[in-house]
Structure formats: structure tokens, C-alpha cells
Amino acid sequence: MKRILFSLSIPFFFLLVNGWAAPLEFFATVTGKSTSDSVTILQVQVTPSLSLDVTVTTVTELKDADGNPIAIDDVDEGSTVAIEAVHTSGGFLALEIQLQEVAEDFSIKGFLEAVNASEFTIKIQGFTILTDESTRIRDESREAITLDDLAARLDAAGSSGLLARVDGVYTDSGLLATRIKLLENDHFARISLEGVISEFLSEDQFILDIGGGTQATVNILPETVLVGEPVAGLTVKVVGRLAPDLTVNALRIRVLGLFELSPDDVEMGYEETQDVTVLLRQPLETDLTVQITCADPSVASCSVDSLTIRAGELSGVFQVTSGTTDGRTLVTVAAGDAFGGYSRNLKIAVGEGVPGTRPTQIQWTPSVVRAAPQGHVDVHLMFKYGRAQEDIPIGLELIDASADLDLQYPANVVIQQGDNSVGIELLFGSQAGSGKLVAHLPEDMGGGTAELDIDLRSSSQAPMHLSWSEKKIDVAPATDFTMTLRLSRVAEGEILILITPVSGDRGVLSSMESEVTVPAGKQTVDVPLQSSEKTGRVKLRAALPREFGGAHADLSITVK
């Protein structure tokens, strides 16, 4: 059996294609796999009657059951996987795939499409769900209603739609709802998106490209707050509400820009040259030509007066060269009127001194390493200004290292003549520990140093996990029994765990705790339970508070 979880609550990924939105998370079994170039097509089975093709690209994040990165070759036929995907004109595009253990329940959130009281079915997100006499139906106020009531509510809602959450189990007959809960229409309404405006459909509606082949339709309303002028090609952040037609009614649109400059503020000595990268926030479908203007060429001049970034590319590079005059100036990089005249400035300061006598300085990028989830981290050691006039050897030294830090690094690296940086791979044999990796310039270059701060997340900062002593248990009616909950590490303070029935028949238990507490210094807690005279099955979910990672664990109890 497979768990299915469909939801409109994914905050950043949804797509409108032919008027249909399909943000999906689902569990399925991989039944086939084919690869061409950098694209892999997975054939997956969701239910006996539903199979899908899912496209895996470089956009897709692949994880094992513990959340560690894997390659597509590690996803084998027969694997149970959790897939987060969006529906595009070319089919389902996977945003994330994680190997999973098999589960037995499902949850669907979205707009109800149909309610057939005579056939005891509902339809939501394209799936027909069975109901029976045990299905609990609640309105927005948690009041019990019937399937006929639900059908009448859907008819009355009209174009406004009717949002619901459906929980249930997989049976041989199909998906069976155990609970249907109506939600307020603004339950999922608050949405935050960031992307590039690809085109305007009208003066008050545009298509927002949010990456990975994913788009959204955004409506500009009279009450929409605009920060900057939204123009096709610019990157914007949209905060809005999901409309019944699954477009986004914008509450606020803030223009983030078209590109950035790296660096955007430099200090230079006399007659030095600095590379400047024009970095697009997202690739464009057409070439982009920007104009480059140096305000005071006597302080610093530019290598070109225009730069073209080809369609599909992310960056272009030009150079600025300082003169022999002290002072400050600006370099302006501007797009055309088609992009609202968007521009960015590079601040340049040329300091005092004789050419060649300014002290050489180096720096780490990034300057801090906090985690090494894949066992390695790539960093760069670079000059703050200028380039190497010859091969420059730089020694590396680890100082102030804690006992639990396991780090492999080269003793020496070289910045080659003509370069301004060198890449370094740091190999970690631990997921915790701290220290400083110090880079030393040769004494004849002033002996300058740069420190890389290493402070890996300690085990006490890692997400906490939760587990039952058993995942499934069979008990006789009218029986007292105890189950144990175990944390993945000892609690540093009291931790409250909430316990809730999530599927099945709550009536098979005559007594259960809704919350238990793990005392400080302990790792386990016993949960007393009592079965009733009734036979059946119930699934209990124990959940940690959000501040401890919000992990949960399920216990399936069968009374027979």
C-alpha cells in the first residue's frame, strides 16, 4: 500500500496550465526509469488504477530516507518514493524526490470538484474518493454535516469554490475517506512567490516564471501595493491570495531587480584591474544588452561600454581599471527602456600610494562554514583586489580545533599567475566541531592572513526524531497496554509530545493520553492505552513541537 499526500499548501510551487493547477506531493512505487541526456523519466504507480510519468532534471532535489543527497542511479525500480511535483505542459516535473518506507494513509487538500451523495463519492484534485457510514464530515465550525449537506454547500459556493481536507486510507476498492473537513476559503490564500515576469497578458495581469518550468498567473488589483514598476523581464516578489480560479490576487508586488553586480563596492590601488560580474537573477529567453558608463575615467575606466548576456545564460563579465588619481567614482550598468530603465551602480574608491606598494590582502568566500551535509564544502581563497602577477603559494593551517572536528585540507594552495582566486575542497569526517582555517601569504608579500570560521552544527542542534517502540500492534478488546515513545537524543529540557488519532476508528480505544512529557535528561516516555470492546483499527500520531523540528511518528493499533 502507498501513502498519497496532495496539497495546495506548498508555498512556492504551483502552475496554471490550461486553467488547471497541480501542486502535488505523493507517495508512489517506481515501476520504470529511462534516461536521456540530463533528463530522466520515472514511471511511478500511485494506485492500482493510476500511473504517472515524472520528469527528473537538474532542478530536482534527490534524497535518501534520511534526507541525505543521492543520485538518480540510487532510485531503483520497486522503490517507494515521496515526490513533490508540479504539472507542466510537458507532464509532471519533480521538484523533490525522497526514498520512503511504505505507508498506508493519504491526505488531500484542495478545492472540491464534485460531491455525489447517491454514489457516496467526492472528487478533489482529480481523484475520486469513496465515503461510507464511518466517514466523518465537518464544516468550517467543526459541526457534523452529511454528504447531502456537503453537496448542497458545493452547489451554493459556485465560482467561489469550496476548500476541504480529506484524510483516508487506501483499500482494495480505492481511496476511502475517513474524514472530510471544510476549510475557510482563505485557509491557503496567503501565498508568497518570487520569479521573473515573463509576459503581461493585460495591463493588470501577468505570467510569473518561478523556475523549473513553473509559472503562475498574477492579478494586479486596485488595492495592490506596488514597490517599483513591474515590467516584463524583472524579478519580483509577490505576496497575495489564491483566487478560486487558482490565479493569485496580489496584495503586494515588490520589484527585486533584473541583475546584480559582483562586487558592487571595491577599493583599488593605482593601475589595478578588477573583474565585475553582471549576474542575472534568472536566465532570460532573449539576449540582454546593458550599457556601462564610468562617471570619471581618470579615477577608473571600463573595458567596454556595453555588454551582452546571451539568452539562457546567467552572467557576463567586464573589467574596470584604476588610474593614478586618488578619488571615488561610480560605474553604472543599465538595461534598456524595455526593462523599465533598471540599473545598478558599482562604487569604486582608488586609494593613496605608489603603484605596486599597496599591501596584498586575501579573504575567504564564504567566510564561515556552518554545515557539511555531503561530507565536503567548496570554498574559495581570493585577493581582495587585483590579480596574481606570478604564482602565489599560500599556506593553510587549522587552529583552535575542537576534538570532534575531523577535517582534511591541503597544506598549501597556489593562486596562479593572472588569477585572483583558487578553489579548495574541504573534506569533513564529522558533522560537528569547530576551528579556524588560517591562510598565510608569503612574508615577502606582507605575510597577510585570512581566517575561515568553521562551526559545524552540533548533534544537539540537529533535528530531533521520534519513534514508537513498535510501528504496529495487535491487542485484544478491553486490554490495558503501554507503548513507549523514544527521542533520537536525550531531552535537554522538558519536551511535550502531542498524540492524535489521524485515521481509522477512535472508538476502538477507551482510554488514551492526548499528550505526554519527556522529562529533562530522559530519552523515552511510556504511553498508557486501553482498548475498548469494539474491534477495528486506529492510527495514532505522536508529534514534536515545531521548535524541535516538528517530527512525527505513527502507531497502528488493531483491536481484534
Image (spheres, rainbow, N blue to C red):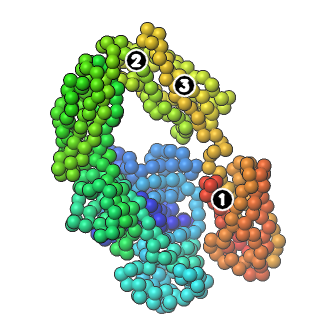
Which residue was labeled with disc 1?
544
Q: CA distance from mark 1 to mark 2?
A: 52 Å
Q: CA distance from mark 2 to mark 3?
A: 19 Å
Question: Helix or strand or loop: what does disc 1 sit on?
Answer: loop
Which residue was labeled with disc 2?
360
Residue drawn at x 42%, y 54% as measured from the top left? 95
Tell me the amino acid under the disc marked 3.
Answer: Leu
Q: Give the answer, above or below, for where 206 lies relative to 340.
A: below
Q: Quadrant of residue 244?
A: bottom left
Judge left or right: residue 473 versus residue 291: right
Q: Is residue 319 visible?
A: yes
Earlier sequence position, callout 1 versus callout 2 = 2
Rendering coords of residue 163 (x, y %)? 46, 76
Tell me the amino acid under the disc marked 2.
Answer: Thr
Q: Quadrant of residue 461?
A: top right
**What crowding class fits label 2: few (fewer than 14 Cα within 10 Å), some (14-19), or many (20 or more)?**
some
Q: Give the answer, above or below, for where 252 lies relative to 336.
A: below
Which residue was labeled with disc 3?
437
Q: Give the answer, above or below, for where 520 lies relative to 152.
A: above
State the quadrant of the C terminus.
bottom right
Judge left or right: residue 22 versus residue 77: left
Q: CA distance from mark 3 to mark 1?
A: 37 Å
Q: Give the answer, above or below, for where 390 lies relative to 432.
A: above
Tell me the amino acid under the disc marked 1.
Answer: Leu
Rendering coords of residue 41 (x, y %)? 38, 54
Question: Which of the two discs, 2 and 3, sits closer to the camera?
Answer: 2
Q: Would you say the residues marked 2 and 3 are in contact, meaning their CB atoms lie under 8 Å apart?
A: no
Give the number of callouts: 3
State the quadrant of the N terminus.
bottom right
The numbered mark at residue 394 is none
